[in-house]
Image (cartoon, rainbow, N blue to C red):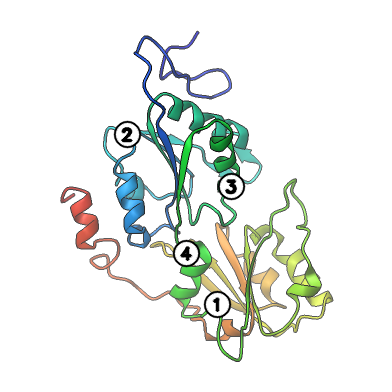
Amino acid sequence: MPRQGETSAKGLVVLGGSREPRPPGEVWLVGAGPGDPELLTLKALRVLGTADVVVHDGLVSDEILDLAPPQARRISVAKRKSRHSYSQDEIGRMLVAFALDGLTVVRLKGGDPFIFGRGGEELEACREAGIACYVVPGVTAALAAGASAGAPLTHRGAAQAVTFVTGHAAKGGEPDLDWAALAKANQTVVIYMGLSQAGVIAGRLLAAGRDPSTPALIVENASRADERRVLTTLAGLAAAAEALSGPALLIFGEAMAMAEAQVLSVPPSVRSTSPALRASRGGR
C-alpha cells in the first residue's frame, strides 16, 4: 500500500499514516484571476498565504503560485482539451481527503471559481463530506480582456447586456446554445473555450440573423505578458481564429468597435511588480 504522500495507481494522493488524528481542515476555492498577479484580490493573496496544500489549474501562472508558502505542497490538476490529469470527481475527493487530514487546502482556479470554473461541483463535494468550504471570487478573463483592449462589455447605446457562454460542449462538438437570443443586436456576447469552434459559432450566429459586420474581438492569454488580440468582424471570425491557439476568448458585439487590436507594450518595471506583491514575496 502506498505510504502517506505517495500516489496511487489512479493518481490520487494517499493520506493517512501514524500521525494522531487532527480536527478537519478547510477548503478555499480561490479565484486566481486571468494571469496577472496584480489582478489577485487582497483576500485571495491572504488566503493563499495560509495554504498547506495548493491544488491548482494549469492556467494559474508561476508568478501567482510563487506567492504560496514555500513549504506548501503544490498539485497540478491541469485540464486541457481531451486531456485531463484528474477527473472532476477525483479532484473533489482530493480536496476532501486533504481537509479531513486537518490541512488548509487552497483550490486555486484561473479566473473566477464560479464562471465556467466548475467551482460549484467542488463546493458540493465539500458540503456532502461535511467539510467547511469558502469561496474567494476572482477577476474572470472576460473582464480582463475587455479592459486591456479598451472595449467596455456594456456601453450605453451599444450594449445594454452582456452574456457569458461556453463554446465547449460537455462531450465535445458544437455547443448547445440559444443562437436566436445571442444573435440579437445591442448586446455583447463573450464565448469562453470557443476558439476551436469559432467557425461553427460564427455560422450559427449569422444564420440566426446577426449582422456579418458586427465587430468581433479575439483575446488570447488576457492580462498576461504574451497577450494577443485580433479585431475582426463576425464574418471574419473563423479566419482570424486560425492564427491563434488559445486559451482565448471570443467577444462580439457593437461595443467591440472600441477595441484596440494592437497590444500596447507594457514595460517590465510596471508589470506585476507592485510594492504589495514584492512585500508578499519577502522582497523577492
In this figure, which residue is indicated by the disc labeled 1?
153
Q: Helix, strand, or loop for circle 4?
A: loop
Q: Nearer the viewer, mark 3 or mark 2?
A: 3
Q: Where is residue 42 in the image (x, y as percent from the top left)?
A: 31, 57
**Residue for point 32% across, 34% down:** 72
Marks 4 and 2: CB-CB under 8 Å? no
Amino acid identity at mark 1: Leu
How far apart in space, not on screen, are marks 1 and 2 (Cα)? Answer: 38 Å
In this figure, which residue is indicated by the disc labeled 4?
222
Marks 3 and 2: CB-CB under 8 Å? no
In this figure, which residue is indicated by the disc labeled 3?
120
Q: Where is residue 56 in the image (x, y as percent from the top left)?
A: 45, 42
Amino acid identity at mark 3: Gly
Question: How many neighbours does mark 4 have within 10 angstroms: few (below 14), some (14-19), or many (20 or more)?
Answer: many
Mark 4 and mark 2 lie on one chain; the one further toward the N terminus is: 2
In this figure, which residue is indicated by the disc labeled 2?
72
Q: Which of marks 1 and 3 is in front?
A: 3
